[in-house]
Each structure stands twice: as structure tokens, then as C-alpha cells.
Image (tube, rainbow, N blue to C red):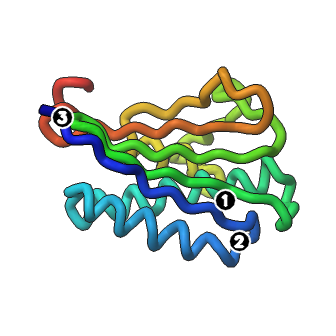
Amino acid sequence: MAIEVTPIVITIPSHPRHLSIVRAAALLAAEIYGMTTAEAEDIRHAVDEACSNVIKYAYKCDCTRKITVKFQETQTTFQVTIEDAGCKASMDDIKIRELDEIRPGGLGIHFIKKAFDVVAFDKKKRTGNRLLLTRYKNMDRQAQK
């Protein structure tokens, strides 16, 4: 019998000073859902990067908007959904810089893909963005790769 777990949902203003709330929630959610300390830190870093990108790119630094972050566990996954009402984004538009190119910035997608096995935008969302981040639980991670 599957146990239905109520997701943890937070909504913050799109100001960088509120990212500390998202970082704390991501870290605690990952720990609650059974991640190791190192895994939880990777998730914290990835969620922070994704929300920072919402502020910078989707909202173009407009600090008056909202970002909603949902943390949820299923039997086989840990999922994070990040929603905004900003400019549409596409994985095709996101440029990933090479790791050996030494300069600040541009590594956010590397951090996100390190923490999560599946990174995708929900194409059904008509306005704004819904970023879907999925991490398979340890036993399933090896089978999925």
C-alpha cells in the first residue's frame, strides 16, 4: 500500500535575499526525505541556482514577483518543482559552459544536473515556467543511469 505524502510548498518574493529561505527548505526537505548530508548539500545548491536563474532570467531582476518551490517524495523519487510567471524558458535556450573554461559563472546547470537525474521544463504550462527536477532514490539511481 503506497503512502501518499503531502508535498512541502513554499512561495517567496523574487528578491535574492529570500533565497536563504529556499536554501534552508531544500536542505531540510532533502534530509527529511532521506538524503545523505552530501546529497542534501547538492540539492540545496541546485535549487538555489535554479531560483537564482528565475530571478535573473525569467524575471529580469524584478524583485516584486513570486517563486513557488514544491518538494515531494514518491516511492522511487525525490522531486522539486520550481514555478514562476516570468519569461518562457526552454532547455534548448540554456547554454552550458565547459567545465574547463575558467571564469566566474555559467556552472548552474552543471550543479543542477549533478543533484538531479531528470531536469526538464513542463511544456504544458502556458505562461511562465515550471521546472521539474527529479532525483531517483539510491537504489533506483543506478538502474536509471
Residue 45, percent across and down?
47, 61
Q: CA distance from mark 2 to mark 1?
A: 7 Å
Q: Is residue 25 left or right of residue 138?
A: right
Q: Amino acid at mark 2?
A: Pro
Residue 35, image quadrant: bottom left
Report, in whole angstroms, how far the alpha carbon at label 2 lies from the one at label 3.
38 Å
Residue 82 percent location from the top left of the image: 58, 47
In the rendered structure, which disc, 2 or 3, sits on the residue that comes first in sequence? 3
The crowd level at tag 2 (other Cα within 10 Å; few <14, some 14-19, many 20+) is some
**In front of the other: label 1 or label 3?**
3
Question: In percent of the image, x 83 and y 52: which residue is there?
Answer: 59
Residue on which the image places disc 1: 52
Tell me how many marks there are. 3
**Viewer-proximal residue, 69 or 95?**
69
- Marks 2 and 1 in Cβ contact (< 8 Å): yes
Q: Nearer the viewer, residue 98 or 86?
A: 86
Tag 1 or tag 2, which sits nearer the N-term?
2
Residue 22: name its quadrant: bottom right
Identify whether 92 is placed above or below 82.
above
Q: Residue at x 32, y 59 (%)?
A: 30
Give the CA distance from mark 1 to mark 3: 35 Å
Residue 11, which numbered label?
none
Q: Residue at x 35, y 68 (%)?
A: 28
**Identity, as a three-letter code, of the amino acid under mark 3:** Ala
In the picture of the structure, the residue carrying the numbered disc 3 is: 2
* Residue that carries the numbered disc 2 in the rendered image: 16
As rendered, which of 94 and 103 lies closer to the eye? 94
